[in-house]
């Protein structure tokens, strides 16, 4: 039987709230079993860029990672943010080890090809991007890997990568060895039927219901690619995907955590 593995992703909004992040990390540290944390960026990189006089470049509302920005996101996400999370987890008795995709060749990506928009130094994950042996070695040795969303292309180039996609790729790749649950934590209590009503949590969504929720406008914005990623992960071997509030993590075990996505 495959051992249970949690792959948990926290969004940028949680990272920016030091107290909320602390409460999340407490719950994460208390979660039993094998686990991996993937963290998004937050606004520190944007603030640091502004302090240094580097302008954040946006095309059609999407951030462009030019060379100057890549340096900053690497320093902030793979540096300060990652190490701060690791230090707090150590304080809470969780033996975390901070990694980027370059460490142990854990996640190799390819620079996004330029079509209409040049996103700059952004890495796309292709099948086979994750070195499962590297990650499993840490997990089996009792470490809890904490991944920032910085990867490499194997030719010395660091690349900024979407944290949701990294979490999904890790969960899919490791599902051959572990019974994996992928958990997306953010600042709402789950996928909501009405975005203005925190209590309107949809407890379960089946793959076949996704399209309808999208066309009816119930699921919009960042939730669309998140659910797309999630159902793809399920179709590739992940047992389940759960989406909910970072501070509700203690409810995972009793299956009362946010929204559960199933086949
Ligand atoms: P993250 O915080 O993980 O980076 P995103 O910002 O990409 O997440 O996506 C989550 C956002 O999706 C939420 O902040 C919310 O505004 C939006 N959203 C759209 N539809 C829904 C829905 N039905 N339920 C919950 N959130 C939704």
Image: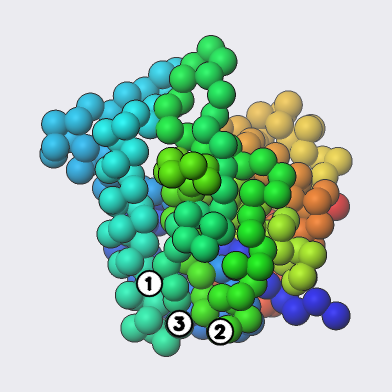
Residue denoted by label 1:
86
Q: Nearer the viewer, mark 1 or mark 2?
A: 2
Q: Nearer the viewer, residue 232 or 104?
A: 104
The image position of residue 234, as x and y in percent, is 78, 52
The image position of residue 240, as x and y in percent, is 75, 60
Q: Is residue 68 above or below residue 81?
A: above
Query: What is the spatial separation of the Cα atoms under label 3 and label 2, in whole angstroms?
Result: 7 Å
- Mark 3: which secondary structure? loop
Query: Where residue 95 is drawn, which disc sits there?
Result: 3
Of labels 3 and 1, earlier in sequence is: 1
Badge 1 vs badge 2, beta-carbon distance below 8 Å: no
Q: Residue at x 49, y 42 (%)?
A: 155
Q: Nearer the viewer, residue 17 or 32?
A: 32
Quadrant of the drawing holding the N terminus: bottom right
Badge 3 vs badge 1, beta-carbon distance below 8 Å: no
Query: What is the spatial separation of the Cα atoms under label 3 and label 1, in whole angstroms?
Result: 8 Å
Of labels 3 and 2, earlier in sequence is: 3
Q: Residues within 10 Å of mark 1 (few under 14, many from 20)?
A: many
| Outermost residue toward the top in this view | 116
The image position of residue 69, as x and y in percent, is 30, 35
Left or right for 136, reference 75: right
Q: Residue at x 31, y 58 (%)?
A: 79
Q: Is residue 238 above or below residue 42?
A: below
């Amino acid at each position: 039987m495959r051992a249970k593995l949690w792959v948990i992703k926290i969004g940028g909004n949680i990272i920016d709230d030091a107290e909320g992040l602390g409460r999340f990390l407490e719950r994460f540290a208390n979660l039993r079993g094998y686990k991996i944390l993937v963290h998004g960026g937050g606004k520190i990189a944007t603030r640091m860029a502004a302090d240094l006089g580097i302008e954040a470049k946006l095309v059609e509302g999407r951030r462009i990672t030019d060379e100057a920005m890549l340096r900053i996101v690497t320093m902030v996400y793979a540096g300060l943010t990652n190490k701060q999370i690791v230090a707090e987890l150590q304080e809470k008795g969780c033996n975390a080890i901070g990694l980027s995709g370059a460490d142990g060749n854990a996640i190799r990506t390819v620079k996004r090809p330029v079509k209409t928009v040049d996103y700059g130094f952004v890495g796309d994950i292709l099948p086979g991007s994750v070195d499962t042996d590297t990650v499993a070695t840490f997990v089996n040795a009792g470490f809890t890997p904490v991944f920032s969303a910085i990867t490499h292309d194997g030719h010395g180039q660091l690349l900024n990568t979407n944290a949701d996609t990294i979490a999904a790729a890790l969960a899919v790749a490791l599902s051959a060895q572990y019974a994996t649950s992928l958990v997306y934590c953010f600042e709402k209590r789950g996928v909501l039927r009405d975005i203005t009503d925190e209590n309107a949590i949809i407890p379960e969504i089946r793959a076949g219901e996704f399209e309808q929720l999208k066309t009816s406008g119930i699921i919009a914005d960042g939730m669309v690619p998140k659910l797309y990623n999630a159902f793809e992960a399920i179709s590739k071997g992940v047992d389940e995907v759960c989406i909910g509030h970072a501070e509700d993590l203690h409810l995972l075990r009793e299956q009362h955590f946010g929204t559960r996505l199933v086949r």
